[in-house]
Amino acid sequence: MTISDDDTPPLFDAPQLAEQERMVEAILFASVDPIGLKALADRLPHGSDAATALELLRRRYEGRGVHLVKVGEAWAFRTAPDLGFLMQRATTEQRKLSRAAIETLAIIAYHQPVTRAEIEEIRGVAVSRGTIDQLMEMAWIKLGRRRMTPGRPGTFVVTEAFLDHFGLESARDLPGLKELRAAGLLDNRPPPGAETDEDTDDTSAGQDEMFSE
Amino acid sequence: MTISDDDTPPLFDAPQLAEQERMVEAILFASVDPIGLKALADRLPHGSDAATALELLRRRYEGRGVHLVKVGEAWAFRTAPDLGFLMQRATTEQRKLSRAAIETLAIIAYHQPVTRAEIEEIRGVAVSRGTIDQLMEMAWIKLGRRRMTPGRPGTFVVTEAFLDHFGLESARDLPGLKELRAAGLLDNRPPPGAETDEDTDDTSAGQDEMFSE
Amino acid sequence: MADDDWTTDLRLSPAERLEAEALIVDVTGYEGPLDLLLALARTQKVDLRRVSVLQLAEQYLIFVERARLLRLELAADYLVMAAWLAYLKSRLLLPPEPGEDGPTAEELADHLAYQLERLAAMRRAAAELMARDQKGRDFFVRGLPEGVSVTRRTVFDATLLDLMRAYARIRTKDEFRPFSLDRDSIYTMEQALGRMRELIGFSGDWADLTSFLPKGWDTTPARRRSATAAHFAAVLELAKSGHVALRQGGLFEAIEVRRREGTP
């Protein structure tokens, strides 16, 4: 079965179309650049039909893990777009939370619901937007209900994910000051704020209980 | 509304085998170097069966212009050897190996693990440092484990790159290996009267192991 | 090239002799004595297993002799081999001496034949290896590899202990004030000073210090204490700078304050 529409048969028969397809496959696979139709035809045995072989090959790779794609005027194999994720390797790096972030998180956990202004008041320094964003992204904190005070400031509370990560049933399971002190994490001297209790509004009511003995 | 029942299907099913095959195809197509089964499995979604997907893929490419070949414990796509004539030769001209280097390489491949002294015994001449260096640089040979004989001489073995270069699945597939072994030509036969090392058996264990089937 | 020059016992045909001599030309082309022996053995045109080692020894010795006559420098190992082969030849020709131990001449000859066969086999194997399809010559790798892009993801971690430590750190800060309302009970001296500076201008006569306290600061003892202390400190400061005069009737009596004459 030769492919020759000329009246004069060629000196050498061109290979069968299936064989031409194999050749195109091998050439495109090994090529360091996409190959145009003309260049492809030049490399195939005389009398081959590069365009048809290419079209057969393109159809063969339809739906496969690699596709035959046209790049400008040239052709190349490329990873199927839906499998692009396989060509990415995610490396995960464990890093400790920054001091600002862990302190902010601790304040939210112990005092929730707590406003940003209150966090700043407690830490004594401004809380950067980035710190809050980071904790939000980690899904360890979320917005709580707004405070019923002038300006209706938003509050922050810890999330289920936070409790999961730290192995807590609820934020109330956080060790209280007494326990922190017993664990040697606090000075023996009672903290200056510990005796102020006349000012309990609903802001701190929840967490104050934690520290009552 | 909680997900609680035991018969709940797993959250993420492994993709279907046909899809896994596509993924293996994409990963191997994208790589120049062979990829090991383990590395492949690591890149596939959890629960995938890389070995089965590989086998499906290997069969799919049988007779194509590109083949899936096994190199040691790894896999790679390579153009079919019968189409080599179509390919443009690698631009970097391969360094011509000396006769000494080729013979040394063959001796290492067929006798591995083999010491320098044994190579010299077989060739009847000293092995020059340059020859070993060249083969090492080409990454075709590497140091094997030390021989447990006095002086603990180092041994040489061939590498996966060697197998890859010569299209061998394993050192077991070296041409004529069985015949050479049957003819006793791969034995480590000491000269008569020479003091026999107590571990002569261990010496030749390397290629012996290859034939335990 | 006088044939009668050498003393070796020659059992070679003239043709074999010629071939041995022809090999001389290539003396530098051999890779050692074993290589030369293999070339000589091939001239016997028999399977290497059936090669006559005696004949081979003679071929080799002729070769070495010819080289000597031609004043060709042979490497030492060629001469070592020649000596060994001369020894082997004599052993092969003479009956074994009684009581002789060690390997027999036949064993030595067999091993030499084995070495030659093994070298030949390795050469064949090397040729077969090089004749295989080779990467970059007969088969090719992917020309356009698609690299794996590595995306780094950072996962921040913290333990419960980190959390507790952080909280403990905050709680033990000296300036720590846990609740914002806490601040509301404190009237600072700066506040009091500012306030007194304004108020004192309107007070020409002695007035009780407590009457200067701001509204709302007498509601709780804490607030009253804080405001009183702040204002007391403030008037002390003002007295020191000569803006006010202070007087107190006795211990625990009311403290009175008055603007000093002549001050702005």
Image (tube, coloured by chain):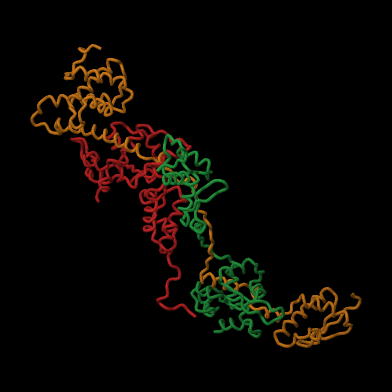
Chain colours: A green, B red, C orange
The answer to whether residue B172 is above or below residue C7 is: below
- Of B63 and A146, nearer the camera is B63
Q: Residue at x 50, y 60 (%)?
A: A92
The answer to whether residue A61 is above or below residue C38 is: below
Instruction: Report x, y in % for residue B54.
Output: 38, 55
Task: Quadrant for residue B179, please give it.
Answer: top left
Q: Residue at x 49, y 44 (%)?
A: A50
Q: Can residue C172 be seen from the camera position used here? A: yes
Side of A75 where B54 appears, left or right: left
**Image quarter (top left, top right, bottom left or bottom right) of the N terminus of chain C:** top left
Residue lying farthest to the left in this orientation: C98
Instruction: Report x, y in % for residue B145.
Output: 32, 46
Q: Can residue B88 be seen from the camera position used here? A: no
Instruction: Report x, y in % for residue C230.
Output: 75, 79
- Of B22 and B45, nearer the camera is B22
The answer to whether residue A134 is above or below residue C254 is: above
Task: Quadrant for residue C116, please give it.
Answer: top left
Instruction: Report x, y in % for residue C53.
Output: 18, 27
Residue lying farthest to the right in this orientation: C262
Residue lying farthest to the front in this orientation: A7
Side of B12 where A154 appears, left or right: right
**Image quarter (top left, top right, bottom left or bottom right) of the C terminus of chain C:** bottom right
The answer to whether residue A183 is above or below residue B120 is: below
- Of C48 and A203, nearer the camera is C48
Side of A212 where B95 appears, left or right: left
Q: How many marks?
A: 0
